[in-house]
Image (cartoon, rainbow, N blue to C red):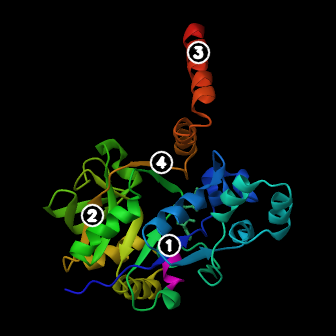
Amino acid sequence: MKIKKVTKAVFPVAGLGTRFLPATKSIPKEIMTLVDRPLIQYAIDEARAAGIKEFIFVTSRGKSALEDYFDHSPELESTLRKAGKDALLEILKETNMDSGAIAYLRQNRPMGLGHAVWCARRLIGDEPFAVLLPDDVIASEKPCLQQMIEAYEQTGGNMVAAMEVAPARASSYGVLDIEEDLGAIVRVKGMVEKPTAEEAPSNLAVIGRYILSPKVLTNLNKLKQGAGGEIQLTDAIAEEAKSGNVFGYRFRGQRYDCGSKAGFLQATVAFALARPDLRDEFGEYLTDLMALQQAAQ
Ligand code: UTP
């Protein structure tokens, strides 16, 4: 079986981000920073490491800060160059994208994740593609999408990142119905969106990394014609599971749900403690804070 290389990735960033209001009234959620980098930078770095060459953003009103972030900033760069601040110039380089490597599309109404991905159909064409939700940030030795692409090269089809969750947490996720457990990879026969603990068909939940075949776009097309409310990506993927073409991948790493306040704060602490320039000072502060809290109880 000849498996086509995955070189395109879609970043759906057109959601309203209501869990972060009022901040998201004027700041796109994806521009919020973990330590000193916006969430979107982590997703782009992960995609680049996995060999992605074309980056497709599905955006909406009020997200222009995202577009500016990936542009050159001639004034800032020339000021830093004159001041000999080469280290800062190097850091800025990571934010620059080659001309033509990045495309922005508009989703004119937030009609759901499935609809956002469908908006990118013309740029994707007849190729497999990755989808990364930037509010899922994954800390791992090997970037999550790279792990998935390596697994996908064995299976083809469609692949979703999966992580184990406690039954009580299943209702926050799409949960995999497993046909065959092959270890890191599972073959999926269905997906249940937000089940109760009793309804959950397994403990494997889908998180925001996908490798999808163009057939999913065809399925989204059909859903779009029939849908009244939001168009769910899960439904379009589940359709493919009927023919045994969907795999879950148990990635190695820690996922943070940075679309929620608690997840964002956890990621901030974890990423700060992982930074050599902050670890000591910040770690000491946290230890003191915990001691003060315990003394007060
Ligand atoms: P979320 O479910 O996290 O929704 O979307 P949200 O609007 O961003 O945030 P809350 O729940 O209101 O706080 C998951 C991903 O899908 C994108 C979001 O931008 C996010 O990356 N999305 C969602 C779209 O691009 N369009 C949509 O219509 C819905």
Q: Mark 2–mark 4 contact, CB under 8 Å?
A: no
Label 1 to label 4: alpha-carbon separation: 25 Å
Q: Quadrant of ligand 1?
A: bottom right
In 3D space, how far apart are the residues under numbered discs 3 and 2 (Cα atoms)?
A: 42 Å
4 and 96: which one is in front? 96
- Type of amino acid under label 3: Gln
Q: Which residue is mark 3?
A: 293
Q: CA distance from mark 4 to mark 3?
A: 25 Å
Mark 1, other Cα within 10 Å: few <14 / some 14–19 / many ≥20:
some
> CA separation, marks 2 and 4?
19 Å
Residue 275 horizontal side relative to residue 254, left or right: right
Please give the residue where the numbered disc 1 appears in the rendered image. 230
| Residue type at the position of mark 2 | Gly
Magenta region: which residues? Answer: 116-120
Q: Which mark is residue 248?
A: 2
Q: Earlier in the sequence, mark 1 or mark 4?
A: 1
What secondary structure is found at the residue carrying circle 2? Answer: strand
- Looking at marks 4 and 3 on the same chain, the residue that comes earlier in the sequence is marked by 4
Does the beta carbon at disc 1 come under 8 Å from ligand 1? yes
Give above or below for 2 relative to 170: below
Q: Of label 1 and label 2, which has the lower sequence position? A: 1
> Nearest the camera: 205 or 96?
96
Which dot marks residue 256?
A: 4
* In magenta segment, residue 238: no
Residue 93 coordinates in the image, percent (x, y): 66, 64
Q: Secondary structure at mark 4?
A: strand
Quadrant of the image occupied by residue 294: top right
Indicate the secondary structure of the residue bearing disc 1.
loop
Q: Which of label 1 and label 3 is nearer to you?
A: 3
Question: Which sits in the foreground, 37 or 190?
Answer: 37
